[in-house]
């Protein structure tokens, strides 16, 4: 670029001139004592900017390999093509997309090594096969998933989905799910209309702050919403086109993701305080404005927000939190199963003495719900609390505990301050528990001494080490069988093999939320419920036991077989609707409630079943857009 002095031009333009300071054709550079005009680069009339006309919008663009640029669409294009919300918030340059593909080309997906011992390269290979099938043929995908549910659920859902979330930014291939970020503030009610379906029955939403046991994974948390809804569709018959996985990107405190060149979430630390809640409120208003009957499941929100969000919305909207409510409902269902194994009734829960190791969100969520079940069966709140002995890392929690005891733990602290901090063995000897629950995250916490002591005072102790993953189980199924001399009934948080003791097969059950959440969601959605009450959750727990076969009960199974998931979900859904009618929380236009009144439980069962998606090839018919929608 050349510079030349031009006093005449300075006289005209330097004082503001006809174009003022924004004159696009000339620029002036002030130098000491004089000014220079900068010669603009020569104009080349042969250079042409290319823009390409697209006659599609939204997902149609993303699903068309000819137009799709994936994460490289910039925000101008995203707005012009109604793509906002359908892609991760951060744009990834073309060069990085090439780099990501070349890595896969050179090394396959194996370069994304599993970090957790429960996810093997074999699991990842299977996940990839299923994922690519899902992207090209959902009916076939769901048919195969349903027919092989026990085998494949751990691939599309936990534990493999944990690996998927950790590496979501590396393995992302095809747009799936709705991304809402802090950048969309004030725009969400418009953005939601970019979603292609006019009806949605269920949303699973996460902010990625506490994904499984893997911590803060930011926008990568979308993988868990996707995996969970796969289970909704396969296990409970939600139609795949009527579910919407969502991640709300409020930033991440995960440094390694923040520094990763391919991370496509917002590069900022997590939003906190009022701003956080305002953003989630806006999300709720936006989705409910377009889908007023939708069920919203909160998934993997960090402990500090999970309960607060549940309390904020649960009296107003059809919401639930699987980590808080699903876990407690599943454990209660297992306890009813164990009572059935012993030939006892559900009401006998009032006679159980329960020692719980772990006073965190999982342990205390379970304790509170079990106490509610005891009051339902006749105990006063005070009497129910007396049935529990709770330990944390400092031992037994009593009224003598120094410092601040969290408000949700305090009511369950033992009265006798003299026992403060007592260890597990002394507590077992003192309390003589019938049920021992572990939610401590401490692998191997339960020893032979503990289970032997428990067996001395209880005929058939129920041992529930819930901590995940497998390495954190408080004890294994084999240990439980040996240390209780085959008398123990066993259910763990992670899968454990059945055992043989003294020639007799002993079942090892898994306390898996998958038993409950699909059926609960199905009942709440098909029943057109306004909210989900505690009674509805309890009815879900109670009906689970009806699905266990006599043969399985005789082996000590306290949960039904997962391969029966559709039957389990149907049974739970019907119980949930019945209870919702009793609780008067169904909408006036609930057809399910009418059917129940007119035809009873059997009629309701047929009605709910008729609403479940069956993965079959139905004949397709073409109608132009706008007609018959
Ligand atoms: P957390 O970290 O909030 O709580 C852990 C609790 O264990 C704390 O109260 C801590 O003081 C206590 N603790 C630590 N060492 C102890 C010891 N030696 N003895 C007794 N208590 C001890 O964890 P959170 O979220 O409550 O989860 C706990 C475990 O439960 C995790 O491993 C999680 O994976 C598992 N979990 C399993 C579920 C299932 O099986 N369906 C569902 C939800 C959670």
Image (tube, rainbow, N blue to C red):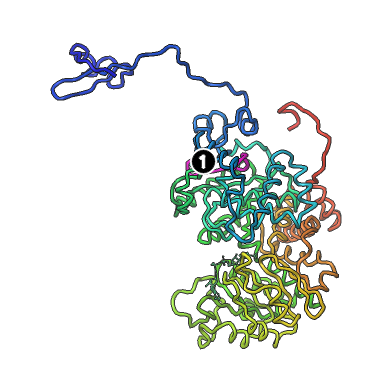
Label 1 neighbour load within 10 Å: few <14, some 14-19, many 20+: many
Near-viewer residue (387 or 70):
70
Which residues are the magenta region?
Answer: 172-184
Q: Is residue 548 above or below residue 40?
A: below
Ligand 1 is in which quadrant of the figure?
bottom right
Q: Position of residue 612 (x, y in %)?
A: 78, 48
Q: How many numbered markers are drawn?
A: 1
- Residue in view at x 65 percent, y 45 percent: 244
The question of residue 341 being in magenta is answered with no
- Residue at the spot of label 1: 89
The question of residue 174 being in magenta is answered with yes
Near-viewer residue (395 or 287):
395
Badge 1 element: loop
- Residue in view at x 74 percent, y 56 percent: 519
| Residue 627 falls in image quadrant | top right
Left or right of residue 180, residue 387 in this image = right
Q: Position of residue 423 (x, y in %)?
A: 55, 83
């Amino acid at each position: 670029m050349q510079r030349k002095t031009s006093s005449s031009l300075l006289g005209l333009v330097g004082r503001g001139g006809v174009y003022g300071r924004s004159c696009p054709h000339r620029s002036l550079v002030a130098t000491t004592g004089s000014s220079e005009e900068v010669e603009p680069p020569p104009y080349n009339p042969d250079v042409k900017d290319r823009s390409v006309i697209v006659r599609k919008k939204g997902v149609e663009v993303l699903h068309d390999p000819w137009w799709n640029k994936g994460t490289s669409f910039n925000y101008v294009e995203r707005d012009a093509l109604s793509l906002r919300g359908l892609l991760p918030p951060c744009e990834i340059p073309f060069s990085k997309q090439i780099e990501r593909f070349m890595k896969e080309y050179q090394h396959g997906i194996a370069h994304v090594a599993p970090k957790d011992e429960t996810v093997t390269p074999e699991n990842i290979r299977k996940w990839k096969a299923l994922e690519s099938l899902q992207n090209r043929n959902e009916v076939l995908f769901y048919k195969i998933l349903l027919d092989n549910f026990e085998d494949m659920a751990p691939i599309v859902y936990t534990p493999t989905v944990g690996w998927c979330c950790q590496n979501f930014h590396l393995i992302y291939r095809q747009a799936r799910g709705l991304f809402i970020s802090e950048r969309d503030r004030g725009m969400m009610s418009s953005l939601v209309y970019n979603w292609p379906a006019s009806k949605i029955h269920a949303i699973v939403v996460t902010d990625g702050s506490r994904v499984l046991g893997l911590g803060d994974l930011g926008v990568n948390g979308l993988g868990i919403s996707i995996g969970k809804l796969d289970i909704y569709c396969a296990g409970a018959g939600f139609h795949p086109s009527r579910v919407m996985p969502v991640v709300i990107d409020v930033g991440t405190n995960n440094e390694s993701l923040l520094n990763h060149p391919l991370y496509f979430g917002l590069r900022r630390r997590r939003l906190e305080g009022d701003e956080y809640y305002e953003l989630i409120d806006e999300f709720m208003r936006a989705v409910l404005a377009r889908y007023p009957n939708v069920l919203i499941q909160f998934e993997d929100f960090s402990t500090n927000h999970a309960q607060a969000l549940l309390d904020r919305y649960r009296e107003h909207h059809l919401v639930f939190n699987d980590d808080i409510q699903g876990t407690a409902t599943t454990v209660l269902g297992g306890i009813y199963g164990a009572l059935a194994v012993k030939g006892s009734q559900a009401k006998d829960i009032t006679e159980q003495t329960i020692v719980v190791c772990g006073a965190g969100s999982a342990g205390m969520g379970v304790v509170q719900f079990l106490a509610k079940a005891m009051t339902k069966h006749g105990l006063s709140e005070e009497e129910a609390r007396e049935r529990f002995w709770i330990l944390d890392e400092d031992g037994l929690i009593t009224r003598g505990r120094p410092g601040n005891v969290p408000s949700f733990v305090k009511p369950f602290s033992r009265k006798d301050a003299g026992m403060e901090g007592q260890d597990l063995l002394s507590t077992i000897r003192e309390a003589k528990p019938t049920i021992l629950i572990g939610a401590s995250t401490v692998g191997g916490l339960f020893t032979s001494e503990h289970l032997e002591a428990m067996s001395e005072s209880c005929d058939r102790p129920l041992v529930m080490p819930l901590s995940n993953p497998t390495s954190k189980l408080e004890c294994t199924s084999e240990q439980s069988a040996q240390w209780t001399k085959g008398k123990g009934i066993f259910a763990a948080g992670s899968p454990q093999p059945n055992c043989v003791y003294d020639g007799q097969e002993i079942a090892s059950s898994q306390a898996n939320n998958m038993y409950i959440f699909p059926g609960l969601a199905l009942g709440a959605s098909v029943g057109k419920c306004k909210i989900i009450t505690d009674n509805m959750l309890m009815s879900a727990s109670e009906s689970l036991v009806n699905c266990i076969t006599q043969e399985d009960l005789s082996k000590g199974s306290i949960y039904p077989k997962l391969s029966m998931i559709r039957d389990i979900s149907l049974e739970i859904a019907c119980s949930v609707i019945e209870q919702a009618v009793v609780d008067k929380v169904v909408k006036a236009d609930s057809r399910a409630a009418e059917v129940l009144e007119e035809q009873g439980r059997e009629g309701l069962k047929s009605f709910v079943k008729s609403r479940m998606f069956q993965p079959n090839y139905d004949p397709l018919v073409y109608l132009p857009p706008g007609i018959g929608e």
